[in-house]
Image (cartoon, rainbow, N blue to C red):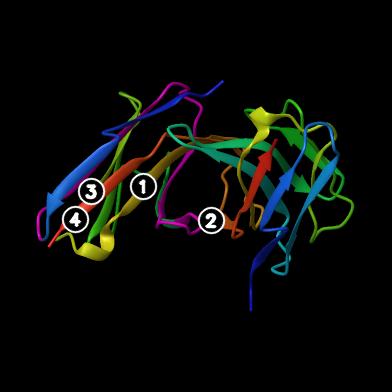
């Protein structure tokens, strides 16, 4: 089954404790992206990647890191989480369409709480 | 950077009526405008999209219109059904940098 998976689905942690949220897709998509979703703010893009070893900042990259060492995986790293990073996180992927994107397929989401 | 505004934030209609959600964007270089539907507790799913070289696109009961001059685009749902109840997000993209609107909560009353 073609899908985007994220792990963990739920995470409660404390301020300053490094964490990684994994994202994996089995559709051979070049493009992958991370979003956070907060009430009243919609979805905001954190980072995106157009292919292996190519990443770029989105709208709200501060406090996050990503890496794209393999085509299928795009982990999101919070080196020192803070309470304002409490949010619902979505990973998404799509076929690379050049300057005009293709349909993005979203993962199931990871609900992160930072105490 | 790009800024996308979406209105209204909530919309309630009777089953069978039409629903219209409007978005404006700030950067004329935006070239891709998708609409996503998100049901409660689920992931966003694309329902329709339009590229900047097209003025209108229709898929059964759903249509999107784009006015590049005014920098706004709209989602039209006709003959609404209770299962259309969800949060709808518009977005605008420049070179794969995607910016979303804040969302519209649509409620279709039976």
- Letter of the chain that mark 3 sits on in the rendering: B
Q: Residue at x 64, y 69 (%)?
A: A3
Question: What label sits on residue A75 in the rendered view?
Answer: none
The answer to which of marks 1 and 4 sits earlier in the sequence is 1
Q: Are marks 2 and 4 on the same chain?
A: no
Q: Which secondary structure, mark 2?
A: loop
Q: CA distance from mark 2 to mark 3?
A: 19 Å
Q: Are marks 1 and 4 on the same chain?
A: yes
Quarter residue A47 falls in: top right
Considering depth in this image, is A106 or A55 the residue closer to the camera?
Answer: A106
* Residue at the disc numbered 2: A103
* Residue at the disc numbered 4: B108
Q: Whole-percent x and y of residue A38? A: 52, 36
Q: Are marks 2 and 1 on the same chain?
A: no
Q: Please say whether residue B60 is visible from this viewpoint.
A: no
Q: Which secondary structure, mark 3?
A: strand
| Residues in magenta, as a range | B16-45
Please identify the quadrant where the C terminus of chain B is shown: bottom left
């Amino acid at each position: 089954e073609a899908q985007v998976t994220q792990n963990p689905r739920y995470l409660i942690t404390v301020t300053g404790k490094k964490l990684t949220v994994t994202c994996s897709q089995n559709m051979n998509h070049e493009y992958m992206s991370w979003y956070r979703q907060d009430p009243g703010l919609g979805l905001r893009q954190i980072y995106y990647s157009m292919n292996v070893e190519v990443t770029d900042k989105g709208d709200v990259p501060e406090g996050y890191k990503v890496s794209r060492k393999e085509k299928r995986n795009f982990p999101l790293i919070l080196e020192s989480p803070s309470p304002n990073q409490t949010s619902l996180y979505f990973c998404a992927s799509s076929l690379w369409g050049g300057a005009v994107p293709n349909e993005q397929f979203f993962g199931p989401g990871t609900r992160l709480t930072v105490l | 950077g790009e800024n996308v505004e979406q209105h209204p934030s909530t919309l309630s209609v009777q089953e069978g009526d039409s629903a219209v959600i409007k978005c404006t964007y700030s950067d004329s270089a935006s070239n891709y405008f998708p609409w996503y539907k998100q049901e409660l507790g689920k992931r966003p799913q694309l329902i329709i999209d339009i590229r900047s070289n097209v003025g209108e696109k229709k898929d059964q009961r759903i249509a999107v219109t784009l006015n590049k001059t005014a920098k706004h685009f709209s989602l039209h749902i006709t003959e609404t059904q209770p299962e259309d109840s969800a949060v709808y997000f518009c977005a605008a993209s420049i070179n794969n940098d995607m910016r979303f609107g804040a969302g519209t909560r649509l409620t279709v009353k039976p």
